[in-house]
Amino acid sequence: MRRSPDAAPLAPAPLEADEVVLVDERGRPCGTAPRDGVHGRETPRHLAFSCHVIDASGQVLVTRRSLAKRSWPGVWTNAFCGHPRPGESVVAAAVRRGVEELGLELSRPPRVVLPDFTYRAVDDAGTQENELCPVLLATVAGDGPELAPDPSEVAAWRWVAPGDLAAAVQAAPWAFSPWSVAQLEELARDA
């Protein structure tokens, strides 16, 4: 297991420029809303994505959400998540967010592995997630490349063996985001 080094922060993307795509129960776009106001006690269903990243040696990247995050601060999760902007594909959004959140430039586009993943969850502060959240998988060259995470998004990161991650999630699911726990279960079933 490798620990994240101190890294220079990246400039955060302006929140006011971000809009999320609202979706109906069938996953069809039905409007937009500002990203900075969409997550609350009654969150409308919207489009998001989760990206899992594996290095050349098969290790999986996990990140710990910043303590400043509005929802699920400080929990461990998959490599990164985000929201496609109106007119942006899920894959393009993942490529963009890899750079913005982790300083990770993907040499190959990630592939969608769970296109219909959806979940609803409420954290301890009452903030609700309600997302149609396709799951992507990206493979990076080399063994655990260095990252330059945005500290407003990521508090820490690790490259871990898949078996170690599975054991940690099984032993302490409450220490991980609910979406990553559910996604890892589905990915294991499909493997």
Image (cartoon, helix red, strand yellow):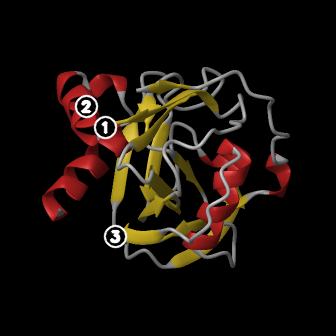
Q: Measured along the vertical axis of the image, is residue 78 above or below residue 56? A: above
Give the spatial CA distance, label 3 vs label 1: 26 Å
Q: Which residue is mark 3?
A: 116
Q: Amino acid at mark 2?
A: Asp
| Badge 1 element | loop
Q: Which residue is mark 1?
A: 161
| Badge 3 element | loop
| Badge 2 element | helix
Q: Quadrant of residue 18?
A: bottom right
Q: Measured along the vertical axis of the image, is residue 100 above or below residue 113? A: above
Give the spatial CA distance, label 1 vs label 2: 5 Å
Q: Is residue 29 visible?
A: yes
Asked whether the beta carbons under mark 1 and mark 2 sit within 8 Å of each other, the answer is yes
Give the spatial CA distance, label 3 vs label 2: 27 Å
Q: Amino acid at mark 3?
A: Asp
Q: Is residue 20 visible?
A: no
Asked whether the beta carbons under mark 3 and mark 2 sit within 8 Å of each other, the answer is no
Q: Residues within 10 Å of mark 1 (few under 14, many from 20)?
A: some
Point 55% across, 30% down: residue: 65
Camera-side mark, 3 or 2: 2
In screen coordinates, is 154 left or right of 144?
A: right
Q: Quadrant of residue 169?
A: top left
First-in-chain label (3 vs 2): 3
First-in-chain label (3 vs 1): 3
Place of residue 166 in the rendered image (x, y in percent of width and height, measured from the top left): 22, 36
Q: Which residue is mark 2?
A: 164
Is the C terminus in the top left, top right, bottom left or bottom right quadrant? bottom left
